[in-house]
Amino acid sequence: MEVVLGIDHGTTRTKVLALDPALRIVAEGAADLPQSFPRPGWVEQSPQAILETTGAAIAACLAGLPAGTSIAGIGLANQGETVLAWDRDSGHPVYPALVWQDRRTADRCAELAAAGYERLVHERTGLYLDPYFSATKVWWILRNVPEAEQLLRAGRLLVGTTDTWILWNLSGRRLFLTDTTTASRTSLLDLRRLAWDPELLDLFEIPQSLLPEVVPSTGQFGSVELPGWSEPVPVTGLAVDQQAALFSHACLEPGMVKATYGTGTFVLMQIGQEPRLSQHGLVTTVAWTLGGQASYALDGGIYTTGAAVQWLVDGLCLLERPEQSAEVARSVPDSDDVYVVPAFSGLAAPYWDPRARGLIIGLTRGTTWAHLVRATLEGIAFRVRDVVEAMEADAGTPLHVLRVDGGPTRNEFLMQFQADILGVPVEVAEATEATARGAALLAGLGLGWWTIRDVAASWRPAARFDPAMGEVQRQRRYAKWRRAVERARGWAE
């Protein structure tokens, strides 16, 4: 038996699965990845823990493979905007990884915007000046970590996202690369030329010599050594996690939309082979590059969704585990006009307000803990509608169905309310680990195992939720939500 591995190096967990040529899952593995929060708005991870977690998840998957299995290739999906810097000679990281959620560069983004650079960045990259993206994180490391400054002067500093860090280490320090989808999340890539942009490099004060080579989403990129595996394994697929999930959902035609629910929720719409810039607060990004041709997507990231439910467990101690939230939400007939805006790390698309903060509004003496739990779940669905409305406005066409994946999609209350507040059906993917599956699909595509048509035919729903809420109630509730969002904005100093 031959298989390809799909590795999803996520924010809090790395997942690995093995697909055979018939697109069947043969084995799976996973390992948790911790985060640290040294200051308000700062989010970091240990570079060594990233490697150890990836190795543990791979080893767990390999242990489940039938005897005699060979690995034809791997696909790697990554966190996207998380940044590391390390010594080319020793391999020693100079600082913890700055996670995509990290907000420490909000002031630098505001300075660049005030200096008039927002339009240049948006037109060239499809992105906005926001701490979410990688460039200002690299800028911060170069100016605040003495070892980074020393290595830069010595010509020994390398920087990259988590895919680059993992491949560099697994390849014995031979592969120093990233793919077009990941590079398009840095604020340094020309969206049309698919190359590092000299003017943007100057703007963010980042030498190109520090950056990896940019490659397509599929191909023969070199080989890596997997933990506990005797033979080198080719790397044949690369993508950002959300683009890998978009591919797994077979959103291969313009106008198709998926949402992946996890720590945050990320909504992507495939828009074809022209990088149309959003006029409604969305990001334009590379969906994938196949056969020398890029496809693009509109992207709306929501920083805190599943993490908001975890906050009910860890922060407020209202629940023992997130899975209880659906039952508790159903124990009351409605949220009693309570709204929770989960802006714990600011608001991304379509608001782009790093100074927004979480808000609970509408409390009365009649409010119970169950109302708060229900309002938190509803807040997740409202944020998804914020993004979908912006997509419909940019695309000029209404959404017909939303394809979804991720752990929170097992919450039937949340999925039903999502369908209700959108007014369209929500289809939950049969493949629960869509990102890892998408990475594996790209790897197999790079090997010639299957075609785009095979990928399209492989998508199947496990559940469908049709809207049951009336239009008047839907619009009234959403209007109230927008009022709550405005009260959450601009709070942090």
Image (cartoon, grey):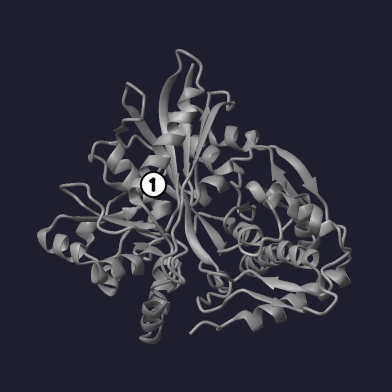
Q: Given the image, on which type of amino acid does mark 1 rest?
A: Ile
Query: Can you identify the residue that label 1 sits on?
Result: 50
Q: Quadrant of residue 73?
A: top left
Q: Position of residue 215 (x, y in %)?
A: 34, 46
Please say if 451 is above or below 196: above
- SS class, disc 1: helix
Q: Residue furthest top?
A: 68
Q: Position of residue 196 (x, y in %)?
A: 30, 60
Q: Viewed as shown, does residue 215 lie left or right of 313?
A: left
Residue at x-position 59% and y-position 53%: 262
Please say if 115 is above or below 65: below
What is the crowding at mark 1: few (fewer than 14 residues within 10 Å), some, or many (at least 20)? many
Residue 237 can be seen in this image: no
Q: Viewed as shown, does residue 389 lie left or right of 449?
A: right
Q: Quadrant of residue 328?
A: bottom right
Q: Position of residue 147 (x, y in %)?
A: 19, 62
Q: Is 317 in front, or is 161?
A: 317
Residue at x-position 79% and y-position 59%: 417
Q: Viewed as shown, does residue 164 lie left or right of 66?
A: left
Q: Position of residue 233 (x, y in %)?
A: 35, 28
Q: Is 354 in front, or is 206?
A: 354
Q: Residue furthest left?
A: 154
